Image (cartoon, grey):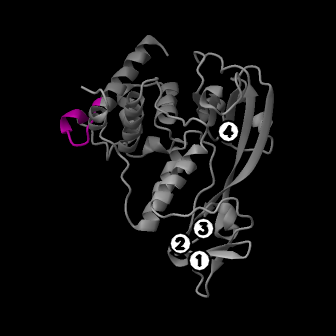
Amino acid sequence: MGLFEKRRARKFFIYVQDYEEEDPKSHEGLDLHKVTTREVISKYGLEDDTVDFIGHALALHRDDKYLDEPAIDTVKRMKLYAESLARFQGGSPYIYPLYGLGELPQAFARLSAVYGGTYMLNKPECKVEFDESGKAYGVTSEGETAKCKKVVCDPSYLPDKVQKVGKVARAICIMKHPIPDTKDSHSVQIILPKKQLKRKSDMYVFCCSYAHNVAPKGKFIAFVSTEAETDKPEIELKPGIDLLGPVEETFFDIYDRYEPANASEEDNCFVTNSYDSTTHFETTVKDVLQLYSKITGKELNLSVDLNAASAAEPGAA
């Protein structure tokens, strides 16, 4: 990025950072609910590579439809990125749990138990039971049926109520070093925009290490994934794998991706989407929020007043 492009990008970032929906003075005469992202970006004369970086690496868009949609969504996404970047010390907008993502369902299991929830783990061949009207009323395993009013599950439990929407190609790479040119970081997220790869979809690279208690001492684990466009993941994923440096062992996988095709209000079944190729879990969080709204009829507000949160922290002035 040249000097003049950096200046133009900085002006745009300042505009985004200062933008407040309730303060017309910060809008610079632009109604972001009406003007498109493309129109806002053109005002600052940003180059295509910069636009790709903003749209895919910061705003986490998965395609370029956003360019012709109201700019308010992209600006809010960028503000979320900036606020997340400033939330914790460490220079990253992302957080990752020690001992891996398996700690998240454990935390929810414990919280559920506090409110009277019961977990039945490692139950084989779970079958969803339906009454004569087609509504789910329980789940049976090993001859025992747990009764319920609603069933929440992933597509594998109800294959006749989902539709295939794509495939994901994924590689898991074992290394004994951090990804080169990342300042020896133990955790890294890299997003390769599809346009720069001449592909139909972005590619995602994520790396964690023994520092997160997910690997033996001295080992690093990298994940490379994308929406599969062929049946040859080792070829499709090469641009991401090439960034890793020497790799001790690589495991390739390709799997179908499903979305629910049922009417949950009719059968009481609430099916999640399959995991997509993204490694930042933004789409997964949105899926969970939508399910919550479907199940409860309420909107779950997870927004945080960062100023209030910072003031409440121990040692805050």
Q: CA distance from mark 2 to mark 3?
A: 17 Å
Query: Are circles 2 and 1 on residues that touch, CB within 8 Å?
Result: yes
Q: Is residue 93 left or right of residue 227?
A: left
Quadrant location, the C terminus: top left
Q: Is 109 in front, or is 25?
A: 109
Query: Are circles 2 and 3 on residues that touch, CB within 8 Å?
Result: no
Residue 117, x across and y down, in percent:
51, 63
Q: CA distance from mark 2 to mark 1?
A: 7 Å
User: Can residue 264 be found in the magenta stretch?
Assistant: no
Give the residue number, with chain letter if any, for mark 4: 225
Q: Is residue 315 left or right of residue 248?
A: left
Q: CA distance from mark 3 to mark 1?
A: 16 Å
Nearer to us: label 2 or label 4? 2
Other residues around mark 3 within 10 Å, as few (<14) / some (14–19) / many (≥20)? few
Give the residue number, with chain letter if any, for mark 2: 150
Q: Residue at x 58, y 59 (%)?
A: 272
Furthest residue in direction top, as rendered: 3
Q: Earlier in the sequence, mark 4 or mark 1?
A: 1
Q: Amino acid at mark 3?
A: Ala
Q: Amino acid at mark 2?
A: Lys
Q: Is residue 237 visible?
A: no
Q: Residue at x 68, y 34 (%)?
A: 223
Q: Amino acid at mark 1?
A: Ala
Q: Secondary structure at mark 4?
A: strand
